[in-house]
Amino acid sequence: MNDSSWGAPPGTGQAGYWGATERGPVQGAAPAGPAYDAPEAQQTRPMPMVPDGPAYGGDQDDDDRGAARLSGPLFRERPPHARPYDTPHARPYEAAQQNPEPMPDAPQPAPQPQKKSAGRDLSAAIGVGVGLGVVIVASLFVVKAVFVGVIAVAVVVGLWELTKRLEERKAIKAPLVPLALGGAAMVVAGYVRGAEGAWVAMALTALAVLVWRMTEPPENYLKDVTAGVFAAFYVPFLATFVAMMLTADDGAWRVLTFLLLTVVSDTGAYAVGWRFGKHKLAPRISPGKTREGLLGAVSFAMVAGALCMEFLIDDGAWWQGLLLGLAVAASATLGDLGESMIKRDLGIKDMGTLLPGHGGIMDRLDSLLPTAPVVWLLLVLFVGSG
């Protein structure tokens, strides 16, 4: 397209683009251009001329010839040497969208300070925790065999939660029947026959998982049995060390020390981390855990360990309790991170919903399970197995 298609028709004497002629505005004709073709000029009403005024901020005429021209926010004169597309004001409808007047920002209300939340239903968590504590202590000091049954029930429920989540989230079918039967037998064998009985029961449970899975098609066999053997070791085998602690003469007090130190460690980490936590401990695994919380767990557990070894364990010493508390804080934190790793891989927040305010049984066993063999071993080293 050449320049003549954007100019005035010959003989009109038009001075500039969208401007007036030397003899005044032409009545009955519209300016030629992309929106007004010459053949249709007689059928189009003329564009009204709007005089310049301060209300529209029009430009002053440079040649002082007094010719009327279109002005205002929609019509601005372009330089004589510019082509229509060389200036942003060449198109009337586009000019209205350019350089809009800024609107004053509306006053925004000040953000309300958010109250720091603990992230759980504390009343339900405390109520459930107290109820579980009463059941455990009552069974522990009344009849030891009843407490062994409590361990076995917790193991079976934990295995059910774990295998159910594996099947739902990963399509892994770890056989629950041999795991549940073998897990309960493992706990009883550990209480009756000690470590030797626990290892034998563990081996037989793994063998039962391998055989049981053979009754189904071979697809995913290796994945399913691997998950089954892992579940057998992770839940019932580690729980067997609690039953083994119970066989000592002061076994009830040893188990109580183990439970108290683990609970105190978790409580110290939770309380200190919630109140003072700023530096993340393992953000990719558990974003809620902080280094300050870990220091709280270590401090609380060491103090509780010194008190327990001094007043609850026969022939125990306070300095042994300091070491025991430090070890419990480390193992409980690692156990909590380990289950957090499993839950992140599965894409879930809790293993179950059986315990209001806590989640599932496995969400309460996460720090207890890896701590059990640590406490059993240190107590045997410090005061013997009797």
Image: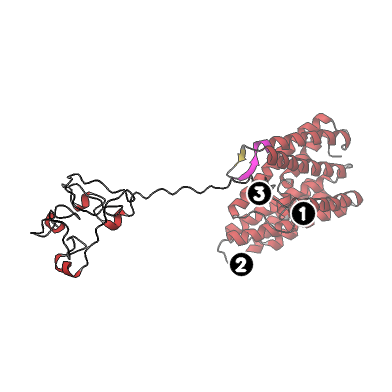
Q: CA distance from mark 3 to mark 2?
A: 29 Å
Image coordinates for residue 79, horizontal then vertical, percent? 19, 46
Query: Is 121 within the magenta?
Result: no
Tell me which residue sits at (62%, 51%) in the image. 342
**Location of mark 1 (residue):** 124
Among the two numbered marks 3 and 1 on one chain, the one whose residue lies closer to the N terminus: 1
Residue found farthest to the left: 11
For the rendered model, the colour scheme is secondary structure
Give SS at disc 2. Answer: loop
The answer to whether any part of residue 172 appears in the image is no
**Location of mark 3 (residue):** 339
Left or right: residue 222 versus residue 48 is right
Q: Which mark is residue 216?
A: 2
Query: Is 292 within the magenta?
Result: yes
Left or right: residue 376 versus residue 347 is right
Which corner quadrant holds the N terminus? bottom left
Amino acid type at circle 1 is Ala
Magenta residues, start to end: 285-293
Instruction: Residue 157: name its quadrant.
Output: bottom right
Comparing 157 with 98, the one in front is 98
Residue found farthest to the bottom: 43
The answer to whether any part of residue 379 appears in the image is yes
Tell me which residue sits at (84%, 42%) in the image. 254
Image coordinates for residue 187, horizontal then vertical, percent? 78, 52
Instruction: Residue 110: name its quadrant.
Output: top right
Q: Which mark is residue 140?
A: none
Image coordinates for residue 140, horizontal then vertical, percent? 87, 49
CB-based contact (under 8 Å), mark 3 and mark 2: no
